[in-house]
Image (spheres, rainbow, N blue to C red):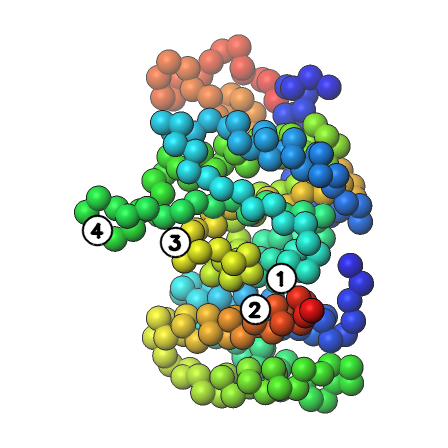
Amino acid sequence: MSFLDLIRTRRSIRSFRDEPISDDDAERILDAARLAPSGGNRQRWEFIYVKDPRVLRMIKNCSPGLYGDPAAVVVIGMEMEKAPFGGVDYGSVVEVLDIGFAAENILLAACALGLGGCAIASFNESGIKKVIDAPEDWKPILLVSLGYPARQPRTPLKKSLSEVVHFDRYGMKWKRLEGKT
Amino acid sequence: MKSDLNDEFFDLTCRVLNYAIEFVNAPGYASLRLVDILKSLIYLQPQIDGVSRGEFYQKLREKLDSRDLLADEKRKSKLLDELLTIYVDEWRSNSFRV
């Protein structure tokens, strides 16, 4: 499958088969995350790969947005830094976006390996920190569930290119996109 | 993973608590109502065969009884976080018992 086809066919997976992920595949997926772009190449992210069923169970309890029983979860977060004018820096928008790039790499790499997953923002930050024993100044930003899909969800309705793309100036349509879905 | 009623009850009540935490800063009474459900479940525990950990649930009951319904969000948040800590401690001592 070409890379562009992979992007087209990837779905958010929320139900999983009871099948473990090999450590080789896990390593490939995490390496894809590591190679994502980051603002100023700061790479402030850290990835906690959880596959212990006991820990997964409690992560699920603390994450209302986590559906299904994934074989693993990647907790992506970063250490908070002292802000230049006092207080703490919870990560700028750019650094949070970086974590989004890494998450997309995780999801695409998983899809390429026949796995699936879903990015989860609905979780209890304090609960996740307690469960994974994260230090006080570490903040989880996003979870990604991983596992073998129990089924392939239908393609959700997507806006057409002509609805979301403007040409040269805001509000100007690109003629070649008209009528395309 | 197979689990018994004991674990399922623990997980269910823990999830209700986490939902309450999720809504604690939202306008309205969602968080409060979820804490009501949590409290009802915790009070049902002694009547359910197969659900033990009496000491743990008693600790939660005492904590919930002491809650102030009209507490400000900060105090409510703190109470819910304390409840969660009790859950995590219980999970840790049961799951990783040597």
Q: Residue at x 39, y 32 (%)?
A: A42
Q: Is residue B35 left or right of residue A136?
A: right
Q: Nearer the viewer, mark 3 or mark 1?
A: 3
Q: Which mark is residue A161?
A: none
Marks 3 and 1 sit apart, C-alpha to C-alpha, by 21 Å
Amino acid, disc 3: Asp
Chain on which label 4 sits? A
Marks 2 and 1 sit apart, C-alpha to C-alpha, by 8 Å
Tags 4 and 3 on a common chain: yes
Marks 4 and 3 sit apart, C-alpha to C-alpha, by 15 Å
Q: Which residue is mark 4?
A: A86
Q: Quadrant of residue B87?
A: bottom right
Amino acid, disc 2: Val
Which quarter shows the C terminus of chain A?
A: top right
Q: Which residue is mark 1?
A: A58
Amino acid, disc 1: Met
Q: Which residue is mark 2?
A: B88
Q: Is residue B39 left or right of residue B95?
A: left
Q: Secondary structure at mark 1?
A: helix
Marks 4 and 2 sit apart, C-alpha to C-alpha, by 32 Å
Chain on which label 1 sits? A
Disc 3 packing (10 Å; few <14; some 14–19; many ≥20): some
Disc 1 or 4, which lies upstream in sequence?
A: 1
Disc 3 or 1, which lies upstream in sequence?
A: 1
